[in-house]
Image (cartoon, helix red, strand yellow):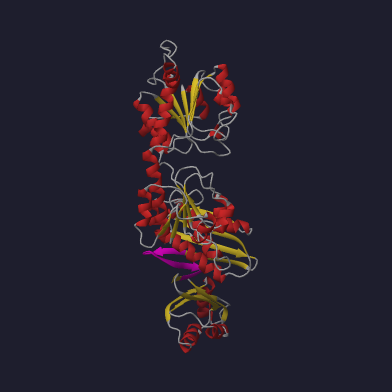
């Protein structure tokens, strides 16, 4: 497999790849024209300088994963990658310590006027009185976003004797209690904070969250620190608040446009500006390079997706537990994709038992991948939902956490204009097994060469099927038979009354050692009681 390293990374990062005998590593010094080099690459590793745009992605014929050594993926067209089924990974948290330390450094600089003290002293001045600062001890720090960086900032702020408030709707009270942090609403955090530090990503909800309206809710004299994203701040509104003195100071490592030009914040009073260096330490840069190398290696060798921005990620433990169910979901899809007829209109995936409480996105994508694989060869775990949406296929999920008699069960329903087919499956040991099909209980392995027969429930059908397969030298490995409820009830009624049985049906799933030949398939279809026959390969 070819690993294309488009930018400089540490020797330790390269070693992760070079220790794998089946990896061919091409560094940025060796690659030449990246548009040519990427064509046969299996993985592409970048930092922030490489523009991984749709044109570059379109050139890649084998690319499975793009690894970004760092947090931001602004230089990667994730939509284009998703459409092509390429995983995009980053390394959130690898530089959390570096960013947290820089945040505290900026807070101390605001509190003690350190940049101005340095400048005036170098200029021959001795402004001790005007540089009298304040302590962090006893002050309240409000943290917006309690992710990895936010947590590390909180820990360090507590060491300085600060009270910490935090706003993050996706953090549990238990974590807050462990960190001795008070979770509050956003307005309460604004009103109670002496220092305010931003640690959230850029979303439609967070863009411009620091504006004239939110500043008006803050404590007069508040000091703002932003080491997250420049777009979180309305520059003009903050500049006005700094000029008026309502905001006591701001320390900014990030800007809406970088490098900033004609930004009003750079001329506002009491502003400390640094050039997006919060995560730039020797230790952090080494760590993000090694981490992305390990993540890319794990994906290429074991299909473990970690820290992906365009597909759900799993830890090693979660992946180990979920893997057989991902396999089950895909095989159910492969099964129904080959037994269904007509254009697919909707696909419904159901989860029953403890599996319903898991992160089901990969299970969903596996079922979609299997269902669509017969007609769309490029579909995979990354782009399955996108492919379905592009084709107007409605996708639904149903979750029922209550236990079933069979334990964890995954169900799949595929509806087309020709009708609907339904299947349920379980994991037995670590193997996928069919539990029932279209209401018939037919427990069979979802593996190998399968033949699905639907027939009128009359004597002699099993024997005729065996005769046809035997004549064609096709060995039966497993024969699963299911009868409709009408079959059993009509048999009882016939025995008690002596009357002829009503029309009833049966379903069989036959596993064979060899695939059915066209001749054998035609012979099965000619059996008088047979209603339909489908050959399935899994």
The one of 379 and 321 positioned closer to us in this rendering? 379
Relative to 512, say whether 374 is above or below: above
Give the total of numbered labels.
Answer: 0
**Magenta-highlighted stretch: main secondary structure?**
strand
Q: Is residue 190 a member of the stretch shown in magenta?
A: no
Residue at the spot 54% in from the left edge and 67% down from the top edge: 336
Residue at the spot 56% in from the left edge and 84% down from the top edge: 522
Report x, y in % for residue 193.
47, 23
Q: Residue furthest right?
A: 417
Indicate the quadrant where residue 110 lies.
top left
Q: Residue furthest top?
A: 129
Residue at the spot 47% in from the left edge and 39% down from the top edge: 170
The one of 499 and 242 positioned closer to us in this rendering? 242
Residue 475 relative to residue 500: left or right: left
Relative to 184, say whether 457 is above or below: below
Q: Quadrant of the N terminus?
A: bottom left
Q: Magenta stretch?
A: 425-442
Is residue 110 visible in the rendered structure shown here?
Answer: yes
Is residue 439 visible in the rendered structure shown here?
Answer: no
Residue 500 relative to residue 141: left or right: right
Q: Is residue 434 a member of the stretch shown in magenta?
A: yes
Report x, y in % for residue 285.
40, 42
Residue at the spot 41% in from the left edge and 12% down from the top edge: 126
The one of 128 and 321 positioned closer to us in this rendering? 128
Report x, y in % for residue 220.
52, 18
Report x, y in % for residue 341.
61, 70
Residue 441 relative to residue 53: left or right: left
């Amino acid at each position: 497999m070819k690993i294309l390293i488009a930018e400089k990374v540490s020797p330790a990062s390269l070693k992760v790849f070079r220790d794998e005998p089946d990896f061919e590593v091409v560094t940025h010094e060796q690659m030449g024209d990246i548009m040519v080099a990427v064509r046969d690459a299996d993985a592409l590793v970048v930092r922030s300088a490489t523009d991984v745009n749709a044109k570059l992605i379109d050139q890649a014929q084998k690319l499975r994963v793009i690894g970004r050594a760092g947090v931001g993926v602004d230089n990667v067209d994730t939509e284009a990658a998703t459409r092509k089924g390429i995983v995009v990974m980053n390394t959130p948290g690898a530089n959390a310590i570096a960013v947290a330390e820089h945040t505290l450094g900026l807070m101390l600089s605001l509190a003690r006027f350190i940049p101005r003290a340095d400048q005036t002293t170098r200029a021959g001045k001795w402004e001790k009185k005007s540089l009298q600062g304040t302590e962090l001890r006893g002050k309240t720090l409000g943290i917006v976003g309690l992710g990895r960086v936010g947590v590390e900032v909180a820990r360090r702020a507590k060491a300085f004797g600060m009270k910490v408030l935090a706003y993050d709707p996706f953090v549990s009270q238990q974590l807050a209690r462990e960190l001795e942090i008070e979770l509050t609403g956003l307005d309460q955090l604004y009103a109670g904070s002496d220092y305010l530090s931003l640690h959230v990503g850029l979303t439609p909800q967070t863009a411009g969250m620091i504006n004239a309206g939110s500043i008006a809710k803050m404590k007069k004299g508040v000091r703002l620190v932003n080491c997250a994203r420049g777009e979180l701040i309305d520059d003009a509104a903050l500049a006005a608040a700094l000029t008026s003195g309502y905001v006591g100071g701001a320390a900014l490592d990030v800007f809406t446009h970088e490098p900033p030009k004609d930004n009003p914040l750079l001329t506002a009073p009491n502003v400390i500006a640094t050039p997006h260096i919060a995560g730039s330490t020797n230790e952090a840069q080494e760590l993000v390079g090694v981490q992305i190398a390990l993540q890319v290696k794990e994906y290429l060798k074991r299909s473990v997706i970690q820290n992906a921005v365009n597909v759900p990620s799993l830890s090693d433990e979660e992946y180990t537990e979920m893997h057989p169910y991902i396999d089950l979901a895909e095989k159910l899809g492969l099964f129904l994709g080959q037994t269904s007829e007509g254009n697919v209109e909707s696909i419904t995936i159901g989860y029953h038992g403890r599996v319903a409480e898991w992160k089901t996105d990969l299970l969903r994508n596996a079922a979609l991948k299997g269902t669509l694989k017969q007609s769309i060869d490029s579909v995979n775990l990354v782009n399955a939902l996108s492919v379905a949406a592009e084709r107007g296929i409605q996708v639904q999920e149903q979750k029922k956490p209550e236990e079933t008699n069979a334990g964890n069960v995954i169900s799949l329903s595929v509806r087309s204009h020709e009708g609907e087919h339904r299947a349920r499956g379980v994991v037995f040991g670590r193997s996928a097994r069919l539990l029932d099909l279209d209401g018939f209980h037919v427990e069979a392995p979802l593996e190998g060469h399968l033949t699905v027969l639907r027939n009128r429930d009359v004597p002699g059908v099993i024997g005729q099927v065996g005769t046809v397969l035997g004549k064609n030298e096709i060995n039966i490995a497993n024969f699963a038979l299911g009868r409709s409820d009408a079959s059993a009830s009509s048999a009882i009624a016939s025995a008690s009354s002596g009357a002829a049985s009503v029309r009833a049906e049966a379903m069989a799933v036959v596993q064979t050692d060899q695939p059915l030949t066209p001749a054998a398939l035609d012979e099965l279809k000619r059996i008088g009681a047979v209603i339909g026959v489908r050959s399935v390969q899994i």
